[in-house]
Image: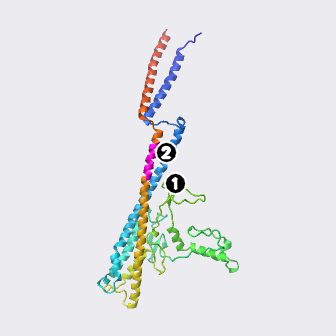
């Protein structure tokens, strides 16, 4: 016994097949337009997972490139500034040598040289303060929003509010009575507050541990310790070198880049040497300029009194030698900045190359071959057109069947 195929059954089947053809054609058209192999995770879980990982790596790579470019710009500004400072110091070599003279014709030039030295010191500080990347002061260490160097009312050079010529305070010697909170040598973090029971000694007598604790407190409250902390500031950024911490939460060396540039390290250092002279080249220039400015404007004599003149000349010669040595340290700082800037430039090239590889890999995973996609679209369009043609025949038969 045969089954009668009704017009309704044919129409339902036709509509279902036509919808499939339309959907298939639409998918093929989207592949041609977007060139994507899949539009959802369910279509190809394996490829979608790989694509997600590649895209995540691309996002990270883009962040690394932005950080690297930003850091390179800072170091480029720092390199340019330190080059100006170093050249300014080098250009004064000939003038420096003139102060060693005693009675020759060049001695009369000491007084104007003094003004040149003092102006040069001011110029160097202005150059260091003017080194900015946007609104950020390059040589201010981690406090990039405030000017790093300034002069106090009494003529002291300040770095972030602390006297650069601060006398050194020795770190206390560790003993068996040292409490656990006392930091190790080289650790410039502030210790925790001393328990109240250790602050005041019973009966007015301090124990050995209390004496040592007070020494540590005095050390960490000193300007010298603060300068040490400022000189060792770090500002680590992730430049794609595998940023990672060890089991103790400490940053692994070499996995990040320290872009902090404390200006206190760039000009010969801080504190006083064994002769009581400042280590900072700006202060040395300032002091030498003051000695030269006080010379006789005609004869260039250091002082009318021969004994005093000899003492002043000895100090001037000592300061001159130290300026030359301090200039060597500024040259070292310039070379260090140049080395790091070169690394940043090479790292930028590496990151860009890595980005190109990731982009190529993403294309291989996500995009279809355009020729294959067009061929598939053409076939699906042919199937869709055929379905429409069959539909015209079904509609004609159903109309005649209805009329009969």
196 up-or-down from 18: above or below: below
Residue 369 visible: yes
In the rendered image, residue 116, in percent from the top left (x then y), is placed at 35, 76
User: Is residue 357 part of the magenta span, yes or no?
Assistant: yes
Can you tell which of label 2 and label 1 is closer to the viewer? 1
- Residue 295 at what x, y percent from top left? 35, 84
Q: Residues within 10 Å of mark 1 (few under 14, many from 20)?
A: few
Q: Mark 1 highlights which residue?
A: 242
Residue 134 visible? no
Secondary structure predominantly adopted by residues drawn in magenta? helix
Q: Is residue 164 above or below residue 368?
A: below
Q: Secondary structure at mark 1?
A: loop
For marks 2 and 1, the one nearer the N-term is 2
> Residue at 36% of width from left, 79% of height from top?
114
Q: Which residues are magenta?
A: 350-361
Image quarter hosting the N terminus = top right
């Amino acid at each position: 016994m045969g089954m009668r195929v009704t017009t309704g059954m044919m129409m339902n089947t036709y509509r279902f097949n036509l919808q499939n053809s339309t959907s298939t054609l639409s998918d093929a058209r989207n592949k041609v337009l977007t060139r994507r192999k899949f539009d959802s995770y369910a279509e190809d879980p394996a490829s979608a997972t790989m694509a997600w990982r590649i895209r995540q790596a691309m996002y990270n790579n883009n962040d690394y490139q932005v950080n690297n470019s930003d850091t390179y710009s800072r170091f480029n500004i720092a390199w340019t500034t330190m080059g100006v400072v170093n050249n300014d110091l080098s250009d004064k070599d000939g003038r420096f040598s003139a102060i060693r003279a005693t009675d020759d014709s060049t001695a009369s030039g000491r007084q104007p040289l003094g003004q040149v030295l003092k102006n040069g010191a001011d110029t160097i500080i202005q150059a260091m303060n003017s080194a900015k990347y946007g609104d950020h002061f390059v040589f201010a260490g981690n406090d990039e929003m405030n000017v790093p160097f300034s002069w106090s009312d009494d003529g002291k050079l300040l770095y972030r509010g602390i006297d650069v010529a601060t006398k050194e305070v020795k770190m206390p010697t560790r003993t068996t009575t040292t409490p656990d909170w006392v930091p190790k040598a080289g650790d410039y973090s502030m210790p925790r507050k001393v328990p109240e029971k250790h602050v005041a000694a019973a009966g007015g007598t301090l124990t050995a541990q209390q004496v040592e604790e007070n020494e540590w407190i005095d050390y960490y409250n000193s300007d010298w310790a603060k300068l040490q902390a400022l000189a060792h500031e770090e500002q680590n950024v992730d430049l794609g070198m595998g940023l990672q911490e060890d089991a103790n939460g400490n940053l692994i060396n070499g996995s990040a880049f320290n872009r902090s540039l404390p200006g206190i390290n760039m000009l010969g250092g801080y504190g006083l040497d064994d002769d009581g002279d400042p280590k900072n080249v700006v202060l040395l220039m300032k002091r030498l300029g003051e000695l030269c400015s006080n010379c006789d404007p005609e004869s260039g004599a250091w002082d009318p009194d021969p004994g005093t003149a000899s003492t002043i000349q000895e100090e001037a010669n000592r300061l001159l030698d130290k300026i030359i040595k301090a200039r060597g340290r500024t040259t070292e700082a310039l070379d260090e900045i140049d080395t790091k800037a070169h690394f940043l430039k090479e790292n930028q090239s590496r990151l860009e190359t890595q980005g190109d590889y990731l982009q190529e890999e993403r294309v291989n995973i996500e995009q279809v071959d355009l020729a294959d996609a067009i061929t598939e679209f053409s076939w699906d369009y042919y199937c869709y057109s055929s379905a429409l043609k069959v539909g015209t025949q079904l509609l004609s038969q159903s109309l005649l069947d209805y009329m009969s």
